[in-house]
């Protein structure tokens, strides 16, 4: 487990335990983080799990694949720091990762 910090649309700071080896979305859903809808369950078709990753963490993540980038172009208010949380597989090196949940997922 690593710590992951979510800043929610309501302005709350949620610190959760994120399980290594599975997606950040799955841990966020398990912890009922506000604003992570994940309608497709991680199939990379809905975009409702998207987050904005702080710059210092974004550069440490593997670059998004083409399909993820395509989905991110279709989310409300596309953002240069946006990622799909279902495509971020948590590793021990991510301890303390900090992300913002956008105000709208659809
Ligand atoms: S859960 Fe649907 S794209 Fe991530």
Image: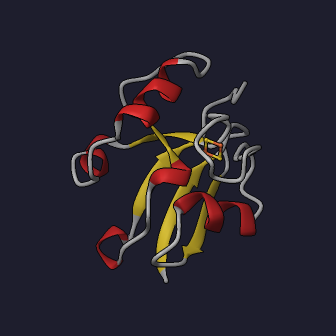
Q: Is residue 21 left or right of residue 74?
A: left
Residue 44 lies in what quarter of the image? top right
Q: Is residue 38 left or right of residue 71?
A: right
Q: Residue at x 36, y 25 (%)?
A: 80
Residue 91 lies in what quarter of the image? bottom left
Q: Position of residue 5 (x, y in %)?
A: 52, 60
Indicate which quadrant contains ligand 1: top right
Image mark count: 0
- Outermost residue, bottom side: 1
In this view of the protein, which residue sits in the foreground, 81 or 47?
47
Q: Residue at x 67, y 49 (%)?
A: 12
Q: Position of residue 73 (x, y in %)?
A: 48, 19
Q: Residue at x 43, y 68 (%)?
A: 90
| The C terminus lies in quadrant | top right
| Vertical arrangement, residue 56 with respect to residue 96, above or below | above
Q: Residue at x 36, y 43 (%)?
A: 54
Q: Position of residue 71 (x, y in %)?
A: 52, 28
| Vertical arrangement, residue 25 with respect to residue 56, above or below | below
Residue 89 lies in what quarter of the image? bottom left
Q: Is residue 34 left or right of residue 76?
A: right
Q: Position of residue 96 (x, y in %)?
A: 39, 67
């Amino acid at each position: 487990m690593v710590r992951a910090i979510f800043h929610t649309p309501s302005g709350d700071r949620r610190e959760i335990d994120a399980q290594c080896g599975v997606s950040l979305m799955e841990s966020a859903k398990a912890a009922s983080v506000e604003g992570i809808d994940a309608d497709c369950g991680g199939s990379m078709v809905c975009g409702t799990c998207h987050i904005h990753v702080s710059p210092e963490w974004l550069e440490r993540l593997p670059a998004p694949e083409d399909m993820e980038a395509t989905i991110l172009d279709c989310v409300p208010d596309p953002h240069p720091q946006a990622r799909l949380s279902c495509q971020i597989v948590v590793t021990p090196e991510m301890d303390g990762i900090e992300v913002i949940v956008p105000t709208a997922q659809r």
